Image (cartoon, rainbow, N blue to C red):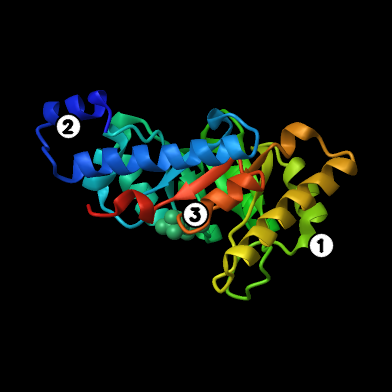
Amino acid sequence: MTWLAALMAAVYDEGMGPYAILARNLETVRERIAAAAERSGRRPSAVTLVAVSKYVDADVTRALIRAGATDIGESRPQQLWHKAEALAYLAPRWHMIGHVQRNKAERTAPLLAYFHSCDSLRLMTKIAQARSRHAGAPLPALIEINVSGDETKHGFEVDQAVAALDHALALQGFNVRGLMAMSGIDSDSLQARREFAALRELRDRLLAKGYPAASLHELSMGMTRDFEAAIEEGATMVRIGSALFEGV
Ligand SMILES: *Cc1c(COP(=O)(O)O)cnc(C)c1O
């Protein structure tokens, strides 16, 4: 733990409680991200940590934000609504990383800083329209691709990527920034790495077709079990939950 984190822990009088553990875990994860970025020839700042708070309540999420997490990921709309209201005064950047049913689009869209999980054309239309109606700025959005082919996973098939991207780029409420994927449930580390490489290669094929680089800059891939491989394969955003809550 840095002296600053130690001081903050003392100030908040949370001792070696959850706050200090979160601060330490956050620092460990950041160090691992930085090391992986350097192995891939990039700066640590080229990789954004999205701290996934879906396992914990608003109080622990608050401690996570106070410990320095700025970008917070949730996979369920209702949980995000609840925390966004409870923690509004801390103004974290909320990332939706899970499946959103279309009837939840209206309420979710204005709260987000980032939408990772665009997994159907109709959902994209709904979210973008809601965004245009309620909030000024277009929503930074990523197209979710099912690189593992798991039937339980959401996301577009690789061969649907062009259609999905064309659709997203035409939406006024969207600012398309790249692609998102998860490795397969049963994938071992070698297979996960292949899946991450497949997302990067898809991105490169889309660039070669002439799609704008600014719309394909971000690759959101990698979670606790595989984020280092994801960074080595080009991830610019990693979504990490479990590793932050060890021992809390
Ligand atoms: C839960 C979740 C994560 C974080 O997973 P951990 O293994 O806990 O790091 C990342 N991405 C998505 C889409 C998730 O649902």
Which residue, given by chain and number where applicable, does mark 1 sit on?
A: 159
Q: Which residue is mark 3?
A: 223
Q: Which residue is mark 2?
A: 9
Secondary structure state at the residue bearing disc 1: helix
Q: Find the distance from the CA under tag 2 to the CA under tag 3.
A: 27 Å
Q: Secondary structure at mark 3?
A: loop
Q: Position of residue 97 (x, y in %)?
A: 51, 52
* Nearest to N terminus: mark 2 or mark 1: 2
Mark 1–mark 3 Cα distance, whole angstroms, equals 24 Å
Whole-Å distance between the Cαs marked 2 and 1? 49 Å
Q: Label 2 is placed on what type of residue? A: Ala
Query: At 27% from the left edge and 43% from the top edge, which residue is drawn?
Result: 22
The residue located at (58%, 59%) in the rendering is: 182
Q: At x 28% / y 28%, what residue is drawn? A: 2
Q: Is the CB of mark 3 within 8 Å of ligand 1?
A: yes
* Amino acid type, callout 1: Asp
Q: Tell me what residue is drawn at x 66 percent, y 44 percent.
A: 234
Label 2 environment density (alpha carbons within 10 Å; few <14, some 14–19, many ≥20) = many
Decide if residue 221 is in sight here. Answer: no
